[in-house]
Image: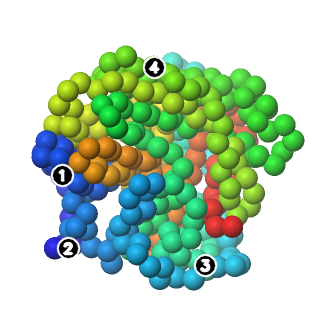
Amino acid sequence: MQTRLCYLTAAQARERMNRYGREARKFFFMTDFEARRCVVEEPARLPEDEIRFAFPSVAHGCTALQTSRPEHFEWEVFPQAYESYRRSFDVVRRNIYAGNSFLANLTCATPVRTDLSLLQVFEHARAPYRLWLKGRFTVFSPEIFVRIRDGRIYSYPMKGTADADVPHAAETLLADPKEAAEHATITDLIRNDLSRFARGVEVDRYQYLDEVPTHRGRLLQMSSEISGRLPAGYAEHLGDMLFGMLPAGSISGAPKRKTVEIIREAETYERGFYTGVMGYFDGETLDSAVMIRFLEQDGDRFIFKSGGGITFQSRARDEYEEMISKIYVPIY
């Protein structure tokens, strides 16, 4: 029986995930960046007129398309002035030079003019992880948070972006010292996160590249694969484990707690569900994603939220342009 979507506190969500994991019950979950609003619900109880999702191995509310695929669409962005971005960047940089952070993810909210609907974007965007919340937002994320299968946990932190259409883009991205430092920092952070709950944690693949098509061209994204072995009975502690790794390192920074404080000081808006986590447990395996590539509806306005990692090697203008480059929809 479907019910209206009900938000839980972090404590309530953690307890329910532990219980459902212990009982091997299927459930969908999502949490906002601050873990203040959470959903943990069995799929049969999720109202399809309010929430839909499509992950690599499961979908909800996607039996038939309700919107037509647009051949052409309006997409005009209105990024904040560089000077405004620079003020936020300087807050982050000042803290990095003071030794308070090694890496901080700075994000922005950008108004967008489009004739697309949230449901159109959800139904026609090409991305491994998609989510639609009626009248609120849609997500089309390429980034895995964690996967659990056969007693092992995997994470795939994504840090490093480049225009794939630029000559020698892959070689340039892999050789960039700023991108390399950023990626090494986040890989180490995620390895430490997994080590709190798993044994024998290793980096299985380091700095591999994926191509992400967009309506404006192709992007390269750099990722690594990290995995470890979970103890027997881990499913009884799914909530403890997942909430113990929040927020995701790739969209916060290192050290995590202090960097989140810096983010609150530097950013000029509330992230909400942007950079939160969504996922699905089928009773045996778990798959989840970071909620990036995020289009939000605010009345008759649309807001796209995007950003990137800042290190001591970052240049404000480059980071500003990267933030803008991520404002896209993968409809092509």
Quadrant including the N terminus: bottom left
Asked whether the beta carbons under mark 3 and mark 2 sit within 8 Å of each other, the answer is no
Q: Amino acid at mark 2?
A: Gln
The colour style of the image is: rainbow
From the viewer's perspective, is 227 left or right of 77? Answer: left
Crowd tier of the residue under label 4, counting other residues whose Cα lies within 10 Å: few below 14, some 14–19, many 20 or above: some
Secondary structure beneath dot 1 equals loop
Q: Which residue is mark 2?
A: 2
Q: Which mark is residue 25?
A: 1
Secondary structure beneath dot 4 equals strand
Q: Nearer the viewer, mark 2 or mark 1?
A: 1
Q: Residue at x 69, y 43 (%)?
A: 220
Crowd tier of the residue under label 3, counting other residues whose Cα lies within 10 Å: few below 14, some 14–19, many 20 or above: some
Q: Earlier in the sequence, mark 2 or mark 4?
A: 2
Asked whether the beta carbons under mark 2 and mark 1 sit within 8 Å of each other, the answer is no
Q: Residue at x 64, y 67 (%)?
A: 331
From the viewer's perspective, is 183 left or right of 172? Answer: left
Q: Amino acid at mark 1?
A: Arg
Q: Which residue is mark 4?
A: 202
Q: Earlier in the sequence, mark 4 or mark 1?
A: 1
Examine the image and state in which quarter residue 150 appears: top left
Secondary structure beneath dot 2 equals loop
